[in-house]
Every structure is written in C-alpha cells, then in structure tokens.
Image (cartoon, rainbow, N blue to C red):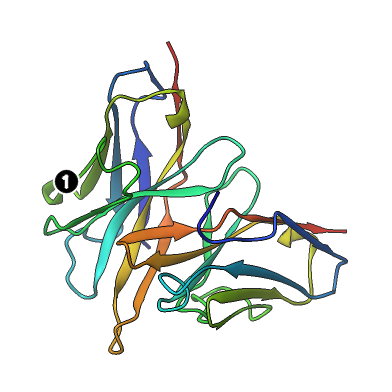
C-alpha cells in the first residue's frame, strides 16, 4: 500500500484528454513538490514533470502537472497510442524519505 | 549526455548480500554545479517503484526506513560510480534495480523538491537458491 494513492487504471480514446490523480498528505505532497514519471512497457521510468508543473527539455506540452493541497494531477491531452504506459507520481516525505505512488496504467482505447 | 548503467549479479541466494554498482558516464559524479544526489530505486515484478537510498558525492546518505537496517549505499568518485549492498536478502527482494540521478533540496520557502533523472536501464536481480 503506497503512501501516495493513484487510481490503478485510466483509459481514454485517441485525441482525448485524460487526468491521473495522486493523493497524499501534509507531510509529503501538501508541503513538498511533486514529480511524474512515464514507464513504457519493458523500459525504465522517464521523468515527465518535476516541481509540480515543470517539463524537462523534450517533453511535449501535451503533458502538464498541477498541485492543490495534498493532491496532484497529471493531465495528458491529444492522447496517442504511444502514450500507453504506467505513470507514477513522486514526492518527498518529511520523514526523510522519497515516495512513489502505486502507479496508474493508461490504456488508449 | 549523462548516462547511468547498473551492473551486478543477476542471481543471489537467500540470506546472502546483493551488491550492485552504477557507472556514470557523460558527467562527473562529484560535480558541484547544483544540488543532487545519486539514488537506487527498485521495482518488484508487476509492482510499483520503491526508493531504496540516495547518496551525495561527499558521503551524506538517505535511506528508506523500511530498508535502512539492511542497505548500504556508497560512492566511489575516483571511478565515477556508486554502489548498493543489501544484506540478508529474501525472495521479496527480487526486483529490477534502477540507479538514477537524484535532484533534491529545499527551496527558499522550505519546501523540498526531489526528482530522479536520468535513470539507468535497470538490472533484474533474482533471489533464489
């Protein structure tokens, strides 16, 4: 059971928008920054979003992040079949520990 | 372009020690241009990500409380590598182990930032007799 809670799966049609939530507490998301990772099948995770809403170089602006209180959201617009992957949120907990969410499997119908 | 590569035995016997090394290329592990650590993360088959530990080139370390008693992370600046040892392994330690560059620190308002980028390709370690 992860400290950061994500829905196990989400789905949407190509071209549509999907959001993935990540719920935590005041000891992690509520007071620290959130990151998001994409893990394509059989590959290592890749950083998508850091500092709640910043994109590393090379990440398309179809991917965006936001945070409100103790929850964060990853939004993906203009869905493509190549976006099918597992998505993980991450944050720091004030108990001096890095945390990841349990992961969300995105299916593009 | 910074690249990381994990190496180590793919099979470890129960109760023994798992030892992995992450080799860093395309940059120095001891660069002081910004605040970052070097970390280990693992992923059991079909499961999510679990952070294990992180180390600063100067030796400062953080450990996952659930693994702290069995894990040791170390850095070798002369060879641009960092390593992980996990003692007394069981089948539950079977996982793909990733190393990654770990950006972290406090901002001006006291909030902590922490993200991992880039990641190595990962190495599967199976614990079995």
| Whole-percent x, y for residue A38 in the image | 59, 60
Per the image, the residue denoted by label 1 is B79
Q: Nearer the viewer, residue A2 or A10?
A: A2
| Whole-percent x, y for residue B39 in the image | 32, 53
Give the quadrant of the N terminus of chain B.
bottom left
Vertical arrangement, residue B87 with respect to residue A34, above or below:
above
Q: Nearer the viewer, residue B59 or A93?
A: A93
Q: Quadrant of residue B86?
A: top left
Left or right of A107 in this view: A32:
left
Q: Quadrant of residue A71?
A: bottom right
Vertical arrangement, residue B95 with respect to residue A34, above or below:
above
Tell me the crowding category of disc 1: few under 14, some 14 to 19, or many 20 or more residues within 10 angstroms, Cα based.
few
Q: Residue furthest top?
A: B129
Give the quadrant of the C terminus of chain B.
top left
Q: How many marks?
A: 1
Q: Which residue sits at x=88%, y=66%?
A: A13
| Whole-percent x, y for residue A21 in the image | 65, 69
Left or right of B116 in this view: B83:
left
Q: Which residue sits at x=59%, y=61%?
A: A5
Vertical arrangement, residue A101 with respect to residue B97, above or below:
below
Left or right of B95 in this view: B52:
left
Q: Quadrant of residue B21?
A: top left
Q: Residue furthest front?
A: A26
């Amino acid at each position: 059971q992860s400290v950061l809670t994500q829905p196990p799966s989400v789905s949407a049609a190509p071209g549509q928008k999907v959001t993935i939530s990540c719920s935590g507490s005041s000891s992690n998301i509520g007071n620290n920054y959130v990151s998001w990772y994409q893990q394509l099948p059989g590959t290592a995770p890749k950083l998508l979003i850091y500092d709640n809403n910043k994109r590393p170089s090379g990440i398309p602006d179809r991917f965006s992040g936001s945070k409100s209180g103790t929850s964060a959201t990853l939004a993906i617009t203009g869905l493509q079949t190549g976006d099918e992957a597992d998505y993980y949120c991450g944050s720091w907990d004030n108990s001096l520990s890095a945390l990841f969410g349990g992961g969300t499997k995105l299916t593009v119908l | 372009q910074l690249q990381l590569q994990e190496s180590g035995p793919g099979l470890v016997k129960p109760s023994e020690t798992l030892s992995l090394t992450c080799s860093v290329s395309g940059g120095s592990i001891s660069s002081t241009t910004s605040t970052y650590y070097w970390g280990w993360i693992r992923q059991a088959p079909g499961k999510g990500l679990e952070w294990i530990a992180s180390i600063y080139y100067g030796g400062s370390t953080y450990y996952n409380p659930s693994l702290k008693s069995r894990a040791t992370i170390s850095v070798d600046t002369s060879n641009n590598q960092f390593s992980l040892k996990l003692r007394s392994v069981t089948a539950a330690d079977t996982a793909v182990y990733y190393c990654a560059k770990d950006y972290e620190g406090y901002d001006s308002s006291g909030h902590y930032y922490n993200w991992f980028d880039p990641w190595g390709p990962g190495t599967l370690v199976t614990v079995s007799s």
